[in-house]
Amino acid sequence: MLRSLLVRLSIAVGLGLVGLVGGASDGWAQDDGSVSVARVKYDGGGDWYSDEESLQELFAFARQHTLLDVEAQEETVELTTDKLFTVPYLYLTGHGNVTFSEAEAERLRRYLHRGGFLHIDDNYGLDEHIRSELAKVFPEKEFVEVPFDHPIYAMPYDFSDGLPKIHEHDGKAPKGYGYFDDHGRLMVFYTVETDLGDGWEPASVHDNPPEKRRAALRMGTNILTYAMTH
């Protein structure tokens, strides 16, 4: 894995190194030093585009409250395109079906092993579909629950009790699952029973209490921070 590019990314806890993906003509950073996040457009009929304003609201919060230098708008990426290898952070959400072809699964595996990060946010209804597709990506691995003392729950905001519960659906506790690489880096973070994306949306969309929306935005900032510094 190449880690030769120093992204001009400064946060309260210091500077982080992010990687260049092998075979990509560009690094993670844009010309102005900012970093892009891309929403995954997938097949299967699920609403990959759901919570349309969520990411830009999260980026605005992160830029206001930290020195994270993320682009103001997300990009959209399909796993079949080479654009995949120019962004350090992928976001995947939805309520319904998702399918990866064998080629897409292999490309996603290569992207993650070479330094990329994937956050999957179940918008309630995705879970039964995404697990089998991720098994194509990592047939030798199983999801493990990310322990509450992991840095993703601590930097820059303290979530020592784990993920916040933003929306109630079936009353289950929120869970954060992950895939780790051979060096212990969390490369896939899967948030379930929380609906972070709904919490990131403008307050008027879901009528979330201010404290719920703030918790969602803070947790999202932690995820961005971890991804951009590991």
Image (cartoon, grey):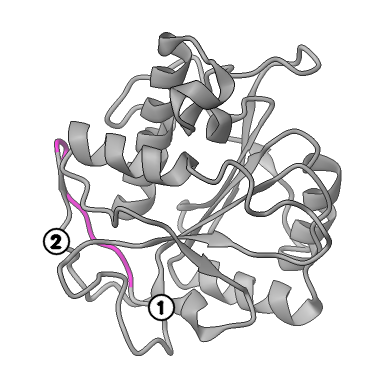
Residue 104: image x %, image y %? Answer: 70, 76
* Label 2 sits on residue: 8
Q: Would you call the spot at circle 2 few (<14 residues within 10 Å), some (14-19), or many (20 or more)? A: some
Q: Nearer the viewer, mark 1 or mark 2?
A: 2
Residue in view at x 38 percent, y 19 percent: 214
Query: Is residue 159 among what the camera can see?
Result: no
Up the image or down, 154 lies above or below 51; here it is above
Residue 185: image x %, image y %? Answer: 45, 53
Check if residue 16 falls in the magenta segment.
Answer: yes
Horizontally, is 206 left or right of 150 in the view?
right
Amino acid residing under circle 1: Val
| Mark number, residue 21 | 1
Secondary structure character of the magenta stretch overall = loop
Residue 166: image x %, image y %? Answer: 57, 19
Q: Secondary structure at mark 2?
A: loop
Nearest to the observer: residue 221 or residue 180: 221
Residue in view at x 72 percent, y 56 percent: 141
Q: Look at the image and give the residue range highlighted in magenta.
A: 12-19
Nearest to the observer: residue 139 or residue 40: 40
Quadrant in the picture for residue 55: top left
Q: Could you tell me which quadrant the N terminus lies in? A: bottom left
Check if residue 204 falls in the magenta segment.
Answer: no
